Image (spheres, rainbow, N blue to C red):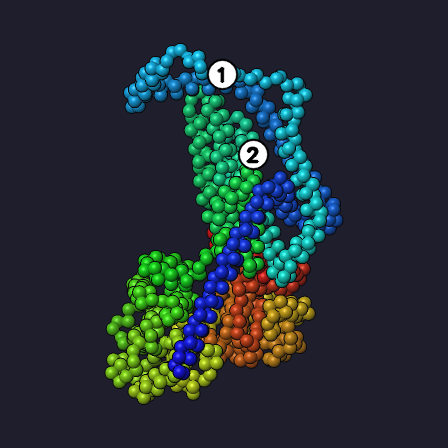
Amino acid sequence: MGESVRNDASASVVSRKELFQDHSQHADVVKIAAALVCVAVIVAGLFYGRSVLIPLAIAFLIGFALNPVVVWFERIGLPHVLAVILVITTALAILGGFGLLLGSQVRSLSQDLPTYQSTIRTKIADLRTQFGGPGIFDGALATVDTVQREVQTAEPSSADSSRPQRVELVPASKSPFQTAFEWLIPSLEPIATAGIVFVFVCLVLLDRRDLRDRLLRMLGGNLHRSTDAMEEAGSRISKYLLMQLMVNVSYGVPIGLGLWFIGVPGALLWGTVAAVMRFVPYVGPMISAIFPIALAFAVDPGWNMVIWTVALILVLELVSNNVVEPLLYGSSTGLSAMSLMVSAMFWTALWGPLGLVLSTPLTVCLLVVGRNLPQLRFLDTLLGSTPALNLPTRIYQRLLADDPDEAIAIVNEEIATTSVRDFYNTAGIEVLRLAGEDHLRHATAEHRLRVANGMDALLDDLREQYAAPDRAGAPPRVTCIGGKWQIDSVSAEMLAHALSLDGVPADFRSAGVVTASYLDKLDLEQDGIVCVTYFSAEPEKAAKHFCRRLRHRWPGLRIVLALWNAPAELLEADPRQRLGADEVVASVEEGVRRIHRMAAPDEALAAQKAQAPENDDERVRALGLSGVLDGRAREELDGLARRAAEAFDVGFAVISAIDADREFIIGQSRNLPGTLTADGTDMITMPREEAVCDHVVSSGETLVVPDTKRDPRFADHPAIALWNTRFYAGAPLRTEQGHVFGALCLLDTRPRDLAKDEEDLLNALAADVVAAIAGQEGGNALRSKLSSKGSASLGQSVPE
């Protein structure tokens, strides 16, 4: 009876699960259908509303191009209305001047065209003569003509009287008024469109702030996200238009000069046409090339002018497409090449040639919307140039697809820009983490085998390409051992290779059951170093057991545990008391640094000290002349430090300057403990060799330490311990002469990290600190940074 009840209950649970799955699938189908209907309605609205939407889109595009000039005039003191009037008047004057100049060129060409008729007739006659001789298809064509004549003669000569007679309707003659009206209506349409665009441009520039506020209200939701989206769209489109203008000018000017040198009439006209037509993607350059080639054909009795003109256009096209455009465009749009082509086809099908011109700016707007609205994030995936899969996922996917060769190619491309150790630290361990997460959830036996074989091939290739220095037969001082699973063994192999490249001889052993026979095979040194790696999220029991067995066999052995997925509390605990190990590391970088310090402490400590820059004497002299060490601008520097601490939401911020032997805190966001100077300037000082900022002065680059406890260089640093710091970020204070006085530093009591755009913003704030030290007006670098990026929190750089 009880068994029957349990079976009925389990059957009921299964049926409820099946019912829930069916309902969920039905809901997904409804959502997809609703989305398709919405897309169809939007596309239909774009198509049928093109007569209104096209002028509006053109007006906004021109507004994006002219708005930076209006803002510049406002910054120098002009009222907003006057700045708009001045910009529009100047733009119309420039267009009118070019129109008059080009009109004179057209008139000159139209007067000379009749003189070219004889040259054209002569060339056509020569071509007819050259191609009029017997050819390979003449016999076939003659046969076709013979058959056609035979068929025509076989038809009855007299028409059947019963067949209907053809009647031709002659239309009535139109009056001159009707003819003029038919010609006038088509010509008025572009004039009316131009007038509408002009009115819209004026309104966009005059009501820019009001339009921005209304769009923010329409977007709703998170005001920060909406603001970033609008500013990013504006900055990207403005930058794209500016780069497009520079590319077109850099193409049109050489075309005009080259045609003038060759002798083609109207060189200025054709150079301008070439520059303007490049605003039309893909087909514009081809259309602009027809006119000078045709004119060269008509002017020169020979073929030299035509050949030189074609060669000029081809060379400039190659230079523009392969040198100028990649150099200037860079990542200004953030669109992939495929999305650019598809968007050009889509907008051309909807709006015709004007849609082709507007395709890139409109698609940029869609990209920005998709990047900032979670509901439309798929647009970022479809249109953006950012890879859809990150580096570890791409490598892991190629291994799953049983394509280790492509995975090796991806890894080599990455290592070419970084290093083997950086790859292991950022991507290699992450690939193994993905494999571990999928091991029981999704992976089949074949998938696991592919990943294992692929990783073996990948590591073999890396060891062959980046071989460690020859140890001359010396036994390894460090042995890396996989803790339990295959991925533990692979991570141990990565760590051993990274240690060998760092100058620490290392070997690795595969994972196995910790038995006496397994320990006998390890053959470890009594005073050696062992690193045991674990990917398990709960490695405490296994690691503790392994360490106990190792300690029992080799009491003097130094043990390091590499816990790639361990919880934070386990990493924070005392490793000797809780796990029986000497050290615990959580990354390849940390493992290399800590083990290097254990294996060669003197060498590691020497490498951790910052080296003085080559121009250190000159730098110290310039720092002394600045007067900042005497307390000048202290109040302003404290204000900048407070601004940095509040903007980045960190515990505190300091501004440091380093002379020959000391570090001076010349600005701070709050009171800090430390030794004060004896000359009454009320500055905290410390020896230079204990200054974290000396690393920034030495390298001249921004230094970010996400967790000082996990970085052996700073784990026991005196300043870090004094201020209880877990996070450090320092941007160099670089003068115009190239001297690095010190650093603007962010410090916090909890670990964190900085994104790339946040690093750029920190560097912009550091430039304002340098301006304050020099006695200049601060904030210029920060304003320039924000205006170029469009946002303090956005401003992504999308791969080309």
Amino acid on which the number 1 mark rests in the picture: Arg
In the image, residue 692 sits, relative to residue 454, either above or below, namely below
Hey, which quadrant is residue 203 in on the image? top right
Cα separation, mark 1 vs mark 2, equals 53 Å
Tell me where residue 501 appears, x and y as whole percent: 35, 68
- Is residue 493 found left or right of 292 in the rendered image? left
Quick one: SS at disc 2?
helix
Judging depth in this view, the residue of 668 and 757 nearest the camera is: 757
For marks 1 and 2, the one nearer the N-term is 1
User: In front here: 113 or 49?
Assistant: 49
SS for dot 1: loop
Residue at the image position 54 percent from the left and 54 percent from the top? 34
Residue at (63, 69) in percent of width and height: 646
Which image quadrant is residue 647 in?
Answer: bottom right
| Left-right relation of 206 to 648 | right
Q: Which residue in the structure is indicated by mark 1?
A: 166
Q: Name the residue under label 2.
A: 272
Q: Is residue 541 visible?
A: yes
